[in-house]
Image (cartoon, rainbow, N blue to C red):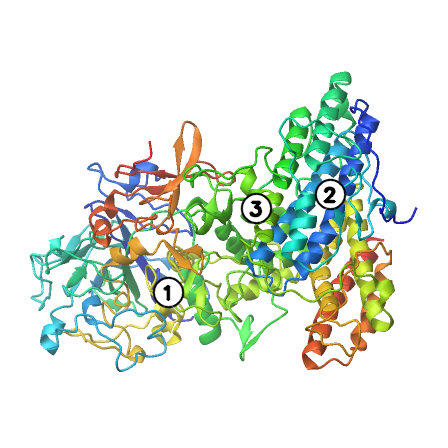
Amino acid sequence: MSQIRRTEPERKVYRPITHPDDLIRHLQWALCVEVSTIPPYLCALYSIVDRGSDAAALVRSVVIEEMLHTALVSNLSNAIGGRPSLAPHLVPLYPGYIPHHAAGGPFIQLQALSPALARSVFMAIEQPEASPRSPAEGNHFQTIGQFYKAIEEGFENCFERDRDLFKHDTGLQRSDTYFGGGGGELVVAHDLASAKRAITEITEQGEGAPQARPPLPGQERFGDLDNYGTRTDGTYGPILGTPWELSHYRKFQQLADGEVPVPETYPMQPNPSSDELDGDLRRLAELFDGCYTLVLLALERSFTTPATEASFFGAAFPVMQSVLPPLATLLMQTPIERKADPDFGPNAGPGFAHRKRTVPELVAEAEHLLAHPPDLGTDYGQAWAGALQATLDELRAVGAQEAAAT
Amino acid sequence: MSPVTYKIHPAIGVARVGDGEHFYIAPETAGGLPINPDGRAFGPDDFRDGAGLVRRQGARFEVHRYDGESPGEPVRPGAGGVARIEWTVHLANKKPVWYGFFVGAGESGYSPEHPLRNPHVTDVAERQRLIIDPGPRTLAGPGQSTEFSRSENPDGYPMTFPPEALEPWRIDSLGGLRTDDEGRLIVLGGYGHSGTDRLPPTIVDYANNDRWWDDTSDGPVTARLVLEDGTVVPVETGSWVLVAPPRFAPELVNAITLYDTMFDTAVRGMGLRPDIYADALWNRSYRPSWEADVRPILERIHRYRWVVAIPRHAHDLDFEKLGDPDPAYRGLREFYLGVVRPPEGPNLLASPDTGLPMMPMLCGDNCFVPGPLGSNYATLTRTQYFYLQQWAAGRFDTGRGEPAQGGAALDRAALDNCVGGAFSPGIEVTWIARNAELFAEPFRIRAKPGVRPPLSLGQTLTQGLEPGDLSKYMALPWQADFNECNSQQIGERFVWWWPVQRPAFVYVERGGRLRQVPWVGTDADQTAPDYVRFTEDTDMVLLWGKLGFVFNTGTSRRPRFVEVARELARDDA
């Protein structure tokens, strides 16, 4: 099956989850939802010129936690015998509606970071449920929190009926693939309590506690310190954050409300696609897609096969770290029209399309591009060479490792 | 047969002040516990004596005999034809006559307008009287003792001491010497007494306070062997003793130790390791050892969280994977290299590539001048960073390498328990440690020959150091810097100074759970004048001896570094 662009809202019917197969199906949907948020957040992050800015730190912390959620959902699925998948038809194409959301849900777009994007798209994705008593909702959910409520109830129901629910564990859960600095833990689900802990972590980090209000001054203690953030004394430092202030919703609200200023961004064409490009620029955009797909496939392998070492640490993690950011930035520095000013754009951008290529194919593409820099001045030439050389080095290392494994 | 030579080890011994008469001996491993003189295992009750006073840390020295290629062995009286060992030490404190400490100034020479301390005293003879110089002391055999005090002056040396009526503490001694039955020397420092003759005692600056004295010091340690036949053999390679402020978390080690800094100086400035660095080029095929060279750096940084407020998860390291040279972990190693601040290039809190805050989360030499061209944040030494680069690239060995043996191990351990940066000014010594001219050979201070009273007001490194020339750069009194330098606001972020000597936060056990509390002061408001410090530096002068030590009550694999032996009440009910 190929990738699907969701341009029509879906209708809503909710039945509680009572069968493990249905629970696994919902966890797969949850995985699609979590994965679908990563490209728009990454795109916003890459669009920020000063990666050391507060806004960048804020968006990055969200992206890292979404990756944690992806891993947590995969663990939950593996815990009860599921096989999480990132097949092309499960990975959205942008722009499009968030998968499995009810009508009226956020229309996800790939754009440079702006207060408007933070409000209309990102806050909408992370919208907290209206009340802690909001009902559980399965497919076509109103809020992600309600969807996870359905999953949590599903675990309770299934465990009620089958005390051996967690005996179907595939043995492929991971606890070592998370490197976030903002708190949170990659929970391995081995019973109902740990499964619920994993779910709580996802919802609290995402939408925050249902009763969303700022903590009163003096309510925070600075003793047992869990993360860095803005403290009630106005300074930045270690805090024992409340779920509310650390939630993705609250973080995006700070960007939307201007509490955290949005710094200069690259003038990227919204919702970029390689289809709109030609020549080497198109090849560059497709190289990005190919590397993104490489990460997806390696990630999928890392929670469906025992070979996590090679696929996560050897491929997904380093490509995510040292290939996607420079390639995305390079695209965002490149005007679509050759004669346009790159400071004004519109510039190209990462399309995050599913485009499967072998590592040798990607290496060959990177080599070709490295040897053919467009004539856009010395600074640009250096950016081009730097990004492609870093890409090439990393892809070669991944390739060498794959070759050694076979 | 090659000639027999003798050396004193450690090359630099570190004593620390304590307000009690009793003492323990300096740890002889990096991050090791001090050593009880009676040989008992060191426990949390051993930081203080029976009266609750802080025991002084003695620096223990021994003479090693080298015969050609052999690693050398300690010389013991009564064995190998040696009847006894005569030890001589000369301690002095020159802080009141040296230049003031100001960040970013002096390392490459003081400017003509650089202010001196106590500038109101201009007469040379009067300035010389500001030096605390009790003169040298000698112990001629085992089981003896002497004091660097006002009242003890065996040779009629023209001693200089500060006025007797100092407040809040008078200074009557810089410490003393002891010899044990094995022919070893133990140098004891002062009592952590600092005082001024201008009342009421007021401290106006973190580093420079006129008319103040403290009882830290330093000086050369020399020895002569008296053989059974009466021949006297001078030990040609002497050592240096440094009396420093206390170290409140002895089992935690600074990311950049004084050994690392002096090793880097020797590698890059003295040709110590041509296999690592020669002709100004790094040897890219050099393979550092994971266990000996790389892991300690990551582990020390990892453990800072026991003494400062650092979020837990950012620093959770999986050492098994990090030490595995499998190419599959290359991405992981590069990730960690990417979050270590490079010594070269813009000096930033966060990585310009990823935006992630970089390690170590500590102040650099110069926190006061903002901007990426300064050195706001601490960096590893270039040699340490080179090790990490080689490791990230997969060019490393998994073994322990060749650990230092015998005297070299003593040299290293003493320095590994000191701060190797940031030098602003530091705890034990300052940026002078980065100057190759300081050394006669790697790790050994060049001693000035034929020192005579009165001690010099100046200094020429190539001629060697006089007593007091190593510690004189440091804050006066040391308690001022010790109080103020806990955390530092740079921009809107707060970073830490030297938390393993001077903790900012400590863990205490409350109701079976560990809770992190400020070591001194309060923590609710980072901008408050008592944020993890005393509001007044003079309180540190009065109360440092009542603060708690940090001690591992867990195991080495599952450590619990908690506060013990605290005598000062804490308002945290």
Residue B72, x across and y down, in percent = 41, 61
Which residue is identified by label 1?
B423
Which residue is identified by label 2?
A34
Q: Which of the chains bears the disc numbered 2?
A: A
Circle 3 SS class: loop
Labels 2 and 3 share a subunit:
yes
Q: CA distance from mark 1 to mark 2?
A: 47 Å
Residue B178 seen in this snapshot: yes
The amino acid pointed to by label 1 is Phe
Residue B366, x across and y down, in percent = 39, 67
Question: In front here: A172 or A234?
Answer: A234
Residue B78 seen in this snapshot: no
Q: Is residue B432 left or right of residue A262?
A: left
Which residue is identified by label 3?
A182
How many residues crowd around disc 1 within 10 Å: few (fewer than 14), some, or many (20 or more)? many
Q: Which of the chains bears the disc numbered 1?
A: B
Labels 1 and 3 share a subunit:
no
Residue A117, x across and y down, in percent = 68, 54
Q: Are marks 1 and 2 in contact (CB under 8 Å)?
A: no
Q: Are marks 2 and 3 in contact (CB under 8 Å)?
A: no
Nearest-to-viewer mark from 1 and 3: 3
Name above or below for residue B403 compared with residue A15: below
Nearest-to-viewer mark from 2 and 3: 2
Q: Is residue B85 left or right of residue A16?
A: left
Q: Residue at x 70, y 36 (%)?
A: A143
Q: CA distance from mark 2 to mark 3?
A: 18 Å
Residue A38, x across and y down, in percent = 72, 50
Q: Is residue A207 left or right of residue B262?
A: right
Circle 2 SS class: helix
